[in-house]
Image (tube, grey):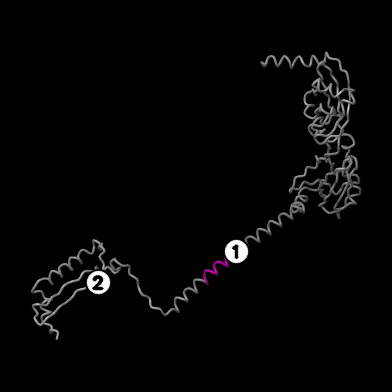
Amino acid sequence: MSDRTMRRQVLLFPLILHLTSVLGQISYSIPEEMPSGSLVGNVVQDLGLDIKRLKSGKARVYTGDSAAYIELNNERGVLLVKDKMDREAICRQTTPCALHFQIILENPMELHSVTIMIQDQNDNPPQVLYPVQTGGSVVAEMVPRSADVGYLVTKVVAVDVDSGQNAWLSYKLQKATDRALFEVGSQNGEIRTIRQVTDKDAVKQRLSVIVEDNGQPSRSATVIVNVAVADSFPEVLSEFTDFPHDKEYNDNLTFYLVLALAVVSFLFITCLVVIISVKIYRWRQSRVLYQSNLPVIPYYPPRYSDTLGTGTLPHVYNYEVCRTTDSRKSDCKFGRAGSQNVLIMDPSSTGTMQRMQSEKSILDEPDSPLESFNNQQKPFV
């Protein structure tokens, strides 16, 4: 189906509804905030219809946004709440608040008008517009010391988004620094003096005003009003710079300060204990090594030259000397090293190897000094 055909059907459908006569008209009244699935009314009974007629006529609910809140159950022939209805969201401040829609049947086409009145419930507390609650900062109303009885200090302004008697507000003075100095109008929220202001009155005055609606059950809101009894602004400024914050704010600040102090103290003590433990451990290890009587034997790794850099070989070379009465038959020979591993020498020790080789060549000569020395020794018996 093309978009042009769909637009034609949408435009023709309201025209058909106007040309079709309304056969029945019913009205229901329900409270707002009813849960989904709640029963609104029995249309079969109230319109005198039959369940079979609803099914065969493909009965349905028609009208804009109302269909989002109400649905028709053809099996039971009743209207049900499809979605929770908030009167303030649907009608705002319009009174009365009502939903209008139609129940349409086909073959033949029938049109039944349905109206649902939404009753307001006291589900919203009053909202204070003035004085504005600014959290930690202080806003004070000034009252001169020359103020007479009935002097208008300020006015508490509040609204309630509910309707009817649920939106009727009343004002009452809950707490005050001096209850004999101020009063609050129960209907208009005006704060006035009820006696002459004197020099003995404190500069800082704190009033707590409660605003209540007329619903059942009643809902309320509380507003704090700071009043400064002074003739000049500098006097007010000097007095209100140290105005105490709310008790809840002070309690939270104290809690976080104590928590931070506890964490820092714990970390400091832990670090101190760790440092002392390490010191004690090192001291005990040094005492154990000092009291030990075992000789310290240096260890030299095998197959490597010594660390002193003398250039001598670490391996022990064995040699045998055989001597007889005839010194010319004496023999001297070098034996092989005990290890057959290849010795890797540092290039800096090449001179030592050459010296060893030269000494060996001297021993091999028949008239070497070593041989002459051996011939001068006494023979074995």
Please state which amino acid type lies under the numbered disc 1. Phe
- Indicate the secondary structure of the residue bearing disc 1: helix
Question: Quadrant where the C terminus lies?
Answer: bottom left
Instruction: Give the side of residue 122 with respect to residue 233, left or right.
Output: right
Relative to residue 282, is residue 9 depicted above or below? above
The stretch of residues the image draws in magenta is 269-280
Q: Which residue is mark 1?
A: 268
Q: In the image shown, does 304 or 155 lie closer to the viewer?
A: 304
Dot 2: element: loop
Q: Is residue 68 above or below residue 180?
A: above
Indicate the position of residue 344 as horizontal and vertical percent values: 26, 62
**In the rendered structure, which amino acid carries the disc numbered 2?**
Val
Q: Mark on residue 316?
A: 2
Residue 121 rendering spot, x and y as whole percentages: 86, 37
- Residue 16: horizontal and vertical position, in percent? 80, 14
Q: In terms of depth relative to the viewer, which is nearer, 136 or 343?
A: 343
